[in-house]
Amino acid sequence: MCSWLPVFIQDLFVVDAIGWIFASVFGFIGILAFIYSFSYMKKYTHLGEYYLAFVLLILSLIGLSFSRNLILIYIFWELVAFSTWRLVGFHREPEAVKIADKTFLIMFFGSCMMLLGFILLYFNFDTFDILEMRGLFIAGLAKPSVMTMVLIFLGIIAKSATIPLHTWLADAHPVAPSPMSAVLSGLVAKVGILGFVRIFVQTFGLTNNWILILAGISSITAAGAAMLENDMKRIIAYSTVSQLGYIFLGLGLMTNLGIISGLLYFMAHAIAKAGLFLCAGIVERSTGERDIRKLGGLIKSMPVTGVSFLFCTLSIMGIPPFFGFYPKLGTIMGLVEKGHFYIAILSIIIAIMTILYLMRIFNAVFLGTNEVSRASSPTTSSGRVYSANKVSRASSTTTSSGRVYSANKVSRASSPTTGSGRVYSANIEGTKLMLAVVIILATLSLQLGLFINIPLDFVQGAVNIIR
């Protein structure tokens, strides 16, 4: 499929349908998050470093999508970890640096385990080329050991934030810039999915019930954590851990229906979750708040953001006719088809929990009443002042945190004498560029569901080739 490439490139890369699926999603969402950054990041310094790390991350993800050599896969794997570390710790605050280091160390631990597995594969197959390995495995000339596959799987779940190596994701999101949050959950956390498809599905076609059990446990545990959390970004982050487990439930079946459902949900989740984080970025940028208990009613002042957020949540919930409905249904049907009735019931429970915690965050942020747009000028326990209309004289409101919020317009922000001197206005729903990006992602979450045959035919063709 890549005969037009030079021979030495052909030995390192494979341009196939699976690669195009992942590279297209990585590239498309990466470009949208990059464009979103132009408006969101302009108030920060060190932007040269930010954009360099961002571009390196996206290029590494695309390179990884087409890699066929295990050493090259490992190099791109580590470049993704390095870029993620730099972007998570972008703000350079002690807490952000600490979390960035934690993120890198967990990923590096997984990478070391995976590299050890790759070395063992080389001893078994005498090659690092996964296509050659596939041929030898099908011919019965060699096969990987259980220990080898376990080591590689540890590397996969470290990158895809699956229990027990999931702790970095929920911590990284609150400290990372919102465009990076979209890339973290939409793309970086999907690297493990790519690794699983390339090695477990495409090369060896190996699975085990323990993969399904681990995926189910990870998914329902993270869903429970999302229901208890109050930080907007952490809720969405735990949702990512839960939905990654759902993707593994489909892929781990190793049936055509399961693999197709897993790949389709990879696409649906990447698009919708990037949209959720970018919408959350608009809310945080305008209000300075992530605690959903202190927000609400923002649909009035942020209608575009609210509707876009709703469309993305409906897709992840699996509500028809949104994109996420079809792969979720396919995953449940695949589990029943293979006789995994208890796991199928568990997946239904997880789907219900997903609806509950996503509706909770949407209701609290956009439909609730404890918010900016309803309060005339209440002082909250945190010392923040909100106004539904206009702050005409901010000098009269001195708070412990020094934050002044307005749902419409701030007429005099220079007057307050406060600790931090920050003034937020919730009428600024984000720039046109930021809104355009979230509208595109929300629209795709619906359009790809309405025209499901387009992604389905492409994914179906890819699965038929590798199976």
Image: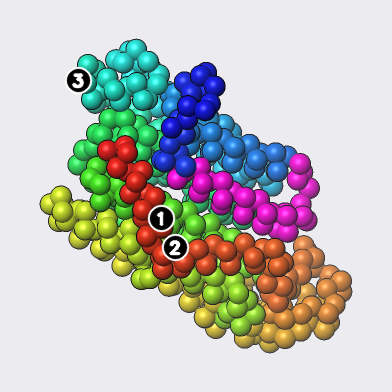
Q: How many marks?
A: 3
Residue 168, percent across and down?
49, 44
Classify 101 as above or below 257: above
The dominant secondary structure in magenta is helix
Q: Are marks 2 and 3 in contact (CB under 8 Å)?
A: no
- Residue drawn 33% across the image and 49% down it: 460
Residue type, numbered disc 1: Pro
- Tell whether position 334 is magenta: no
The label number, if any, that marks residue 214 in the structure image: none
| Separation (CA) of disc 1 from disc 3 | 34 Å
- Which residue carries the number 3 mark? 140
| Residue at x 32%, y 43% (from the top left corner) | 463
- In the visual, does 214 lie left or right of 377? left
Q: Earlier in the sequence, mark 2 or mark 1?
A: 2
Using the numbered discs, state the Cα–Cα distance from disc 2 to disc 3 in whole angstroms.
Answer: 41 Å
Tags 2 and 1 touching, CB below 8 Å: yes
Q: In this view, which residue lies farthest toward the front?
A: 4
Magenta residue span: 21-48
Q: Secondary structure at mark 1?
A: helix
- The three-letter amino acid code for the residue at tag 3 is Gly
Disc 1 crowd, CA 10 A, few/some/many (<14, 14-19, 20+): some
Q: Residue at x 23, y 45 (%)?
A: 255
Say which amino acid is labelled 2: Leu
- Say which residue label 2 marks: 448
Of residues 68 and 148, the one drawn nearer to the viewer in this rendering: 68
Percent x, y of residue 98: 59, 40
Q: Which residue is mark 1?
A: 455
Asked whether residue 220 appears in the rendered view, the answer is: yes
Q: Is residue 285 visible?
A: no
Q: Is residue 170 above or below residue 359?
A: above
Quadrant where the N terminus sits is top left
Q: Is residue 160 left or right of residue 431?
A: left
